[in-house]
Image: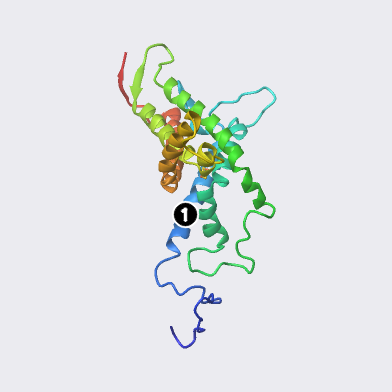
Amino acid sequence: MTEAQTETKPGQRPSHPDITQRKDAWWGEPATIATVFISFIIYATYRVFENNYFESGNFLSPFYSPKLVFDWWKFSPAILILWIPAGFRTTCYYYRKAYYRSFFMTPPACAVDPYGKDGYTGETKFPFVFQNLHRYFFYLAALVLIFLWYDAVVSLFKPEGGMQLSVLSIVMFANCFFLSGYTFGCHAYRHLCGGSLDCFSSCTKAKTRFKVWEFVTKLNEHHMGWAWFSLFSVALTDLYIRQVCTGAASPIVLFQF
Ligand code: FES
């Protein structure tokens, strides 16, 4: 510590501009997360409002699934559906930590002074009190996931009849796999499976719930990984389908009959 820096007593937070005593690149993680988030938000927003190149034959982009087309709705159908996965991710316990650190800096990292005098105030105040809606977004996101699995299965069928296996179908199934790992490793779902029980062995129902809870816990332990893999997989699946729609890429059919 240089003479110009203020001495910090044990247990006391260093004051600005000496926001931390950490010597490592603590800013690397929040900076990377902010960059990835902003990139994804820009791409997703562009794709939603592009309102084109989202369906080719039996391949449907995950951004537009389920496809909701109504006479009274003159805008992109993606707007009608994307608020569900957006709300699910925005209120996700892991993502909260990530963007509270990256964007609000409350604090930006462990043992680093929070930005602003109030710091983290929890989910008790507007608008953060709406984070408590997460469990309801889980129900809706699980519903959307059923449609995505359906889309992946439908992509195996050729519009003119017969079946085919393509690289694009494999990408769609992989996307569903990652999204399922993310969705069913949700903290709210884990509570739904195993919460509010006094005993895990009192009856068959309790034992079954315990088994499901154990499985969900395994997924939950890697929730951060599932969150990132599924974010990338959904963007890449959409990008691949867009490229197929524009003619810039092919689904790469491996075999068909
Ligand atoms: S806690 Fe992350 S999806 Fe529910």
Q: Position of residue 149 (x, y in %)?
A: 46, 27
Q: Is residue 250 visible?
A: no
The quadrant of the image that shows the C terminus is top left
71 on left or right of 244: right
* Residue at (67, 54) in percent of width and height: 124
Q: Give the tally of numbered discs.
A: 1
Q: Position of residue 198 (x, y in %)?
A: 54, 41
Q: Nearer the viewer, residue 248 or 37?
A: 37
* Residue at (59, 33) in percent of width and height: 81
Mark 1 neighbour density, 10 Å: few (under 14) some (14–19) many (20 or more): some
The quadrant of the image that shows the N terminus is bottom left
Give the amino acid at mark 1: Ile
* Residue at (59, 43) in percent of width and height: 134
Q: Nearer the viewer, residue 246 or 171?
A: 171
Q: Position of residue 65 (x, y in %)?
A: 53, 29
Q: Position of residue 32 (x, y in %)?
A: 44, 56
- Seen in the picture, residue 2 relative to 21 is either above or below; the reply is below
From this viewpoint, which residue is outermost toward the bottom?
A: 3
